[in-house]
Image (tube, grey):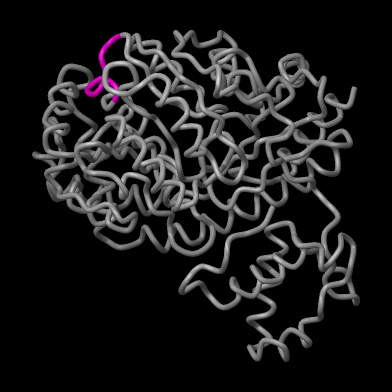
């Protein structure tokens, strides 16, 4: 797969790494072939030796190059990249609104992941060592001591004004401009999505969703009595605007297709990031058919290199887009603090629905997150965490390559914390899951990411950490799948 052209204002080492990877992708350097030396590239690009070393470190993390003692860097001979040919995507031409029924397997996976002593590679939850736990606890306690009376009260919607102001500052980085009065604080991103669907849609409406898509979205649609139309979410690029156009041309917008629920930035489980030109095209199509975008941007802050991706909502009128996100994947899963941003009209209705469901978020948690954002440690912490996730994914992909059956392919995302694995045709990952359960290992089988049990030869592995236990679990999954 060809990488996009170098990003403007990208660090110099990243630009050089992009150029070398482009040459590898074009076959100028073959797998196993020696790459130019550090000194040669130092002379060719007229940059420092340290810059070239950083470029090679980035190529190693991406899985493009590998160092060999006393010999330099060579093009890595694996692992194979999943590009979608190995997957049974829904047929867009035959796509129809369908009732949603969440499979019992989803509940089994969620339950198994919480069993003591089991290795959980299914839950997308940051590893404790990658969270600023002590600093966040210290700041939360400080805020409680300073303002105990107000923090003990309900944080009624729309939520703490200071927190909404800080969130508005972060949203601007995604090219979406909203005021603090256009934000509602929620109990995590999933509640934000639920409130958006509840506010925008009526029972029986259809919603465009990605396939494979986040399995808990199916639970939300089922709970609200909504139907779904699946669109292929392909590795690397996500949803194709041509698919959106074909489906809406046939089914229309308004009451028939009311909303589109997409994860444009590092979609779970594929890890795809929709290119900006495609976001613009999709936004235009949705607007033309009067379909509201509900954008889950929970992984938007988790781009490993360069700046965070631009939101699809930034290409739409504010009255036709709702942005949802949280701090659960970055600094504090247990605090359950998220948000929803949209037009003033939508936000007023969301506040009412919030009062009818969970009433408010935890005041101490919201105050602690506010204090952390104001103190300015968030971006510094994110830079460290992003490198850790990048390295964990590279290490797990290498382990998959070494231990899974020949022909296995895996996605190589550039952000987020999940890997999608496509095993050879005929592999049954539901049967594989049951065998791994006997070994107290949990992963997410492919069929739970679709309406009809597709992707049976696929699975998702969470890559929030890499240690001896994780490596052993991945190798055992590979050994059992080979049988």
- The answer to whether 421 appears left or right of 448 in the picture is right
Considering depth in this image, is 7 or 444 the residue closer to the camera?
7
Which x, y percent locates residue 12? 56, 78
Which x, y percent locates residue 440? 71, 22
The answer to whether 47 is drawn above or below residue 14 in the figure is: below
Q: Residue at x 61, y 37 (%)?
A: 462
- Magenta span has 433? no
Residue 42 appears in the picture as rendered: yes
Q: Quadrant of residue 417?
A: top right
- Magenta span has 202? yes
The quarter of the picture where the C terminus appears is top right
Which x, y percent locates residue 17? 66, 70
- The answer to whether 172 appears left or right of 212 in the picture is left
Considering depth in this image, is 222 or 362 the residue closer to the camera?
222
Q: Residue at x 67, y 86 (%)?
A: 45
Which x, y percent locates residue 10? 50, 72
Residue 117 appears in the picture as rendered: no
- The answer to whether 417 appears left or right of 302 in the picture is right
Q: Residue at x 68, y 80 (%)?
A: 52
Give the farthest residue toward the front: 249
Q: How many marks?
A: 0
Q: Quadrant of residue 435?
A: top right
The answer to whether 2 is drawn above or below residue 67 in the figure is: above
Considering depth in this image, is 76 or 328 the residue closer to the camera?
76
The answer to whether 201 is drawn above or below residue 288 in the figure is: above
The magenta segment is 197-203
Q: Residue at x 41, y 37 (%)?
A: 333
Considering depth in this image, is 434 or 286 the residue closer to the camera?
286
- The answer to whether 348 appears left or right of 472 in the picture is left
């Amino acid at each position: 797969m060809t990488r996009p052209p170098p990003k403007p204002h990208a660090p110099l080492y990243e630009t050089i790494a992009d150029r070398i990877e482009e040459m590898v992708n074009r076959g100028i350097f073959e797998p196993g072939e020696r790459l130019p030396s550090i000194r040669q590239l130092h002379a060719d690009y007229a940059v420092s030796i340290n810059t070239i070393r950083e470029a090679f470190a980035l190529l190693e993390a991406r899985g493009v190059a590998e160092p060999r003692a006393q010999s330099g860097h060579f093009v890595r001979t694996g692992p194979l990249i999943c590009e979608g040919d190995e997957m049974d995507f829904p047929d867009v031409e035959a796509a129809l609104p369908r009732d949603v029924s969440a499979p019992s397997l989803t509940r089994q996976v969620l339950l198994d992941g919480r069993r003591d002593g089991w290795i959980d590679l299914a839950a997308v939850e940051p590893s404790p060592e990658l969270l600023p736990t002590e600093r966040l606890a210290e700041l939360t306690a400080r805020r409680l001591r300073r303002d105990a009376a107000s923090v003990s009260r309900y944080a009624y919607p729309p939520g703490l004004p200071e927190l909404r102001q800080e969130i508005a500052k972060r949203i601007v980085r995604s090219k979406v401009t909203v005021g603090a009065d256009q934000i509602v604080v929620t109990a995590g991103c999933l509640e934000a999505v639920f409130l958006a669907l509840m506010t925008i849609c009526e029972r029986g409406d259809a919603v465009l969703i990605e396939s494979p898509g986040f399995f808990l979205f199916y639970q939300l649609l089922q709970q609200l009595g909504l139907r779904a139309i699946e669109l292929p979410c392909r590795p690397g690029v996500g949803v194709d605007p041509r698919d959106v156009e074909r489906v809406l041309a046939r089914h229309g917008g308004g009451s028939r297709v009311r909303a589109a629920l997409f994860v444009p930035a590092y979609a779970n489980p594929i890890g795809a990031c929709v290119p900006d030109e495609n976001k613009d095209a999709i936004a235009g199509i949705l607007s033309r058919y009067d379909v509201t975008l509900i954008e889950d941007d929970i992984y938007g802050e988790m781009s490993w290199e360069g700046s965070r991706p631009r939101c699809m909502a930034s290409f739409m009128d504010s009255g036709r887009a709702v942005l949802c996100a949280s701090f659960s994947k970055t600094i504090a899963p247990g605090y359950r603090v998220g948000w929803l941003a949209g037009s003033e009209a939508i936000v007023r209705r969301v506040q009412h629905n919030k009062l009818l469901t969970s009433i408010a978020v935890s005041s101490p948690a919201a105050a602690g997150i506010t204090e952390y954002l104001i103190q300015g440690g968030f971006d510094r912490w994110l830079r460290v965490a992003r490198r850790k996730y990048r390295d964990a994914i590279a290490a797990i992909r290498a382990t998959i390559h070494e231990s899974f059956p020949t022909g296995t392919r895996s996605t190589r995302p550039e952000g987020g914390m999940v890997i999608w694995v496509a095993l050879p045709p005929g592999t049954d990952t539901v049967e594989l899951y049951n065998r791994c359960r006997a070994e107290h290992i949990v992963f997410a089988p492919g069929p739970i990411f679709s309406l009809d049990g597709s992707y049976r030869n696929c699975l998702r592995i969470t890559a929030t950490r890499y240690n001896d236990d994780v490596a052993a679990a991945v190798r055992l999954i590979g050994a059992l799948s080979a049988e």
